[in-house]
Amino acid sequence: MNDLNEEGLAKLVTRGGIYYNVPGSTRDDILSNIIAGLTALPPGKSKWSDSLLQAVIEREALISTGIENGIALPHPRTPMLKETDDPFVAIAFTKNPIDWETPDGSQVHTVFLIVSKSPKQHLGALGKINFLCQQKDFYNLLCAQASKEQIVAALEEAEKGWG
């Protein structure tokens, strides 16, 4: 399945996982701790996590992936997965809000790490996450650090409307 429409956002998040109370006082700390805790890494790819961290930090150095209202959407600049690897989106709630250089100056409390196979899949995930984060009900789930079940159910419900 090569495209986000074939494999919905709910499935990508289920694969990537949802992480709570991620420690760190800087953007790089948070990214390092998220990636270190990922359960979705390709098998036997501990070096891969180092490459992913480097790629995400390099992307952040270009321009912050922080968006408004305490949300950040970090990702590598180019897709890193092979055709046989499974794409994923990990959601992480920071233990403490941190500066992520967001346009509105908000402190980031929720991070969506996007790891895809293709630019099309990547842009699809970015667009859908950005849209959902602007929806009050979904945003409230994030602010409340809702359970994995609640977040995945909200994603599945939203996907029904996307056809």
Image (cartoon, rainbow, N blue to C red):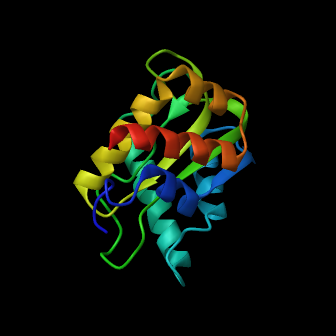
Residue drawn at (44%, 50%) of the image: 9
Of the pair 33 and 136, the residue shown nearer to us: 136
Quarter holding the C terminus is top left
Residue drawn at (23%, 52%) of the image: 120
Total marks in image: 0
Quarter holding the N terminus is bottom left
Say if 11 sits above or below 42 in the image: above
Q: In screen coordinates, is 28 left or right of 162? A: right
Say if 158 sits above or below 107 in the image: below
Q: Position of residue 153 (x, y in %)?
A: 59, 45
Of the pair 117 and 94, the residue shown nearer to us: 117
Of the pair 136 and 125, the residue shown nearer to us: 136
User: Which residue of the protein is positioned furthest toward the bottom in this rendering?
Assistant: 44
Q: Is residue 89 visible?
A: no
Q: Position of residue 105 (x, y in %)?
A: 53, 16
Q: Quadrant of residue 154?
A: top right
Residue drawn at (32%, 51%) of the image: 122
Of the pair 120 and 5, the residue shown nearer to us: 5
Q: In screen coordinates, is 60 left or right of 121? A: right
Q: Position of residue 34 (x, y in %)?
A: 62, 54
Say if 90 sits above or below 112 in the image: below
User: Which residue of the protein is positioned furthest toward the left in this rendering?
Assistant: 120
Say if 47 sits above or below 123 in the image: below
Q: Quadrant of residue 67?
A: top left
Q: Is residue 115 visible?
A: yes
Residue drawn at (69%, 39%) of the image: 94
